[in-house]
Image: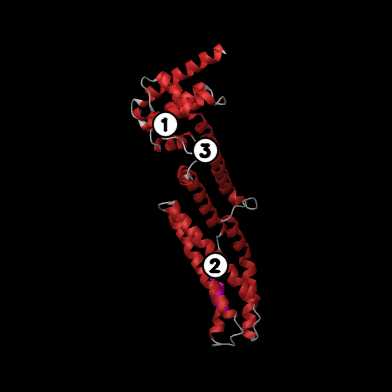
Amino acid sequence: MREAVVQFLYALQPSEPLPESLDPSILHLLLESLRDKSTKARAKAILHLQQGRDKHLESFDHILGPLDLIGSPDPSDDIEPHLKEWREAEERLQEHLEGIRRELNGNRESARLRESMSGAHQSNRASIAAADAATGSTPTLPALREAQELAVQLKNRIAPLFSRLSLALGNEFTELPELRAVARAEKELAQTSSSIELYYGNLRGHLEKVDKELATVIDNYSPDRLDRVDRAILRLGGYELLFDPSIPNAVAINEAIELARAFGTTDSPSFINGVLDQVAKIEQDVSGEE
């Protein structure tokens, strides 16, 4: 969370006031790594839950083969086009599942995984609609009625896979153990998003006072004179020292130093440490006097 807030503060112009709320596009970017984690967990769950679905494609040849010998039946006997639509939807679904499989075994790019999952979702819905239409039709020819009986049997066998894929691509994870990893990732994503927004709101309300305290420690302080990374980390660390009693001073300073090591220059850790240590001492002296 600290890294996300520092990245946002870094992007601001030196003396620019914080906007009332985080830009949704910026928040989306800050949460990208967690969203990718959820995407990959969901992709793995989908492949696991759809194992064996490809074998049902063989049933369509068995059902549709005899119908090819009939020719063009009465247009009112519309089961054949519905069966073909169903088969085509299942074939498209297999292509999307293969795309997920290749990506997980290759580049593991979340954007492509999401694209394949979206395609799988659309194909699954199309398959369900075509299956309902085929099994709900009222054919008159004996061969077509026999095909419908076989279609009903196929739908009953494939129905659990319909449902599992819908669950895997939705937001209800309690029914399937295979989706626990997805549920954990989504929960972490939601909690982090909420924490960042809350943290940002608190920081925004105190930023002016934080800058004033930093000015008492840094000679000729002004936000535009500092390195942008150092400025962002000092503002964050200063807020935690001055206005967040839930974070011990030592923890706030150490976390700021680690951020400086990760994102700043070689001089940043010692500079951040020295400034925040003085801010903490001044705050302690003020608290002691009170």
Q: Position of residue 73 (x, y in %)?
A: 58, 87
**268 to the left or right of 126:** left
Looking at this view, is 257 or 166 the one in front? 257
Position of the C terminus by quadrant: top right
Check if residue 57 falls in the magenta segment.
Answer: yes
Image coordinates for residue 148, horizontal then vertical, percent: 63, 78
Provide the major secondary structure of the magenta segment. Answer: helix
Q: Residue at x 51, y 21 (%)?
A: 249
Foreground mark, 1 or 2, reads: 1
Which quarter of the picture shows residue 224?
top left
Q: Earlier in the sequence, mark 3 or mark 1?
A: 3
Q: Nearer the viewer, mark 3 or mark 2?
A: 3
Which numbered disc, 1 or 2, marks the residue that appears first in the sequence? Answer: 2
Q: Mark 2 and mark 1 in contact (Cβ < 8 Å)?
A: no
Which disc, if any, is residue 55? 2
Q: Secondary structure at mark 2?
A: helix
- Where does the image place residue 235, in percent across and percent down from the top left? 45, 28
188 in the magenta segment: no
Badge 2 density bin: few <14, some 14–19, many ≥20, Cα 10 Å: few
Residue 232: which disc?
Answer: 1
Q: Secondary structure at mark 3?
A: helix
Which residue is tagged 3?
196
Residue range of the region highlighted in magenta in the rendering = 54-63
Residue 178 numbered tag: none
